[in-house]
Image (cartoon, grey):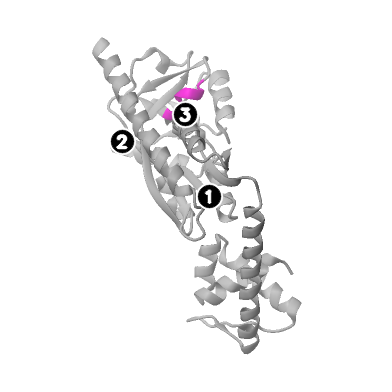
Amino acid sequence: MELRHFRYFSAVAVFGSFSKAAGYLNLTQPALSRQIRDLEVELGVLLLNRNKKRIALTPAGESFYGDVVLILKQTEKAVRKLRSQRRSELLRIGYVHSLLGGCMPNAVARFQAKTKDVEVELSDLSSFEVSKRAGEGLIDVAVLPKSLAHFFNGFEWTEILQVSPVIVASRKNRFSKRSAVAPAELDAEVLFGLGPTGFPEYEPRLRDILRPFGVVPKLHSQLAEDIPALFVQLDARRGAAVLTDGIRTMLPSALVIRPFQPSLGPLVLAAGIPALNANPHADFFVTLLAEEASKFSRQHQKTRRKKTNSR
């Protein structure tokens, strides 16, 4: 028996539903049901009366629930006490670096200047890994495409930036010779991209933004599970991929960026914070990140206008 079993049982008792509790805990319903059944077997008593309309506590379950609440409260109290004795607090941020450009370093620098006693833990992750850690309670701020918000139960979201899709190509690819690429030209190109394990949103999003132009993207069978691997593929295979202009700050010299003309629909980035038990510093950090994102966007638009006027 572990502490997680108490949290699982408490959630089912509160929601009166395996499906709602599973959503809150970021578990599948069968997995949660199995954990509760294992708990009942270990205790040797039936804790829940199960029916199609609602899950109800048995008399033994009601008695056990009262004790579980006390245990969870005492555990939370012990954790808060331990954290208060630390020299510094911790703010854990999970994000996809390739989407944010230069926004994150500036936001962190400003945050640290104002809150010197708070340690910032930055984790550059795939969107799947951010979601997984958030479900485990290991992320205080998640920054990634807003379209993924439905994977994060109990998070509240703030839009921070819109980023434009671009072509990233090998200097030996035909697109590298263009000043801009028409979306319709992708109909004749086998594109490289990011795989569904780490970036489940990548292919559906690509299809959505190309659909208005009558293009069904053809993706190479060898999709990369992270950005560095994708860069290697593009260079080695003289390939091209659709990414966002936030990738500019980490692009190797063997690759180039080309804008779309006409433009494709922007990708909306958002910062999410748990609605319950939120880190007290999370809101302040998101405010700073949104301000830096706004500066980045204005500067990027200014640079693009200068380039357009110089042609």
Towards the viewer: 135 or 107: 107
Q: Nearer the viewer, mark 1 or mark 3?
A: 1
- Element under label 1? loop
Give the residue at mark 3. 191
Given the image, on which type of amino acid does mark 1 rest? Asp
Q: Earlier in the sequence, mark 1 or mark 3?
A: 1
Q: Which residue is mark 2?
A: 214
Viewer-proximal residue, 26 or 200?
26
Disc 3 residue crowd, few under 14, some 14–19, many 20+, Cα 10 Å? many
Magenta stretch bounds: 246-251
Q: Amino acid at mark 3?
A: Leu
Task: Tell me, for residue 140, which label it has, or none.
Answer: 1
**The N terminus lies in which quarter of the figure?**
bottom right
Inspect the image, locate mark 2, and give the three-letter code of the amino acid beneath it: Gly
The secondary element bearing badge 2 is classed as: loop
Q: How many marks?
A: 3
Mark 3–mark 2 Cα distance, whole angstroms, equals 16 Å
Labels 3 and 2: the sequence-earlier one: 3
First in sequence: mark 1 or mark 2?
Answer: 1
Residue 180 placement, left or right of 89: left
Residue found at x 66% / y 72%: 71
Say if the magenta span includes residue 59: no
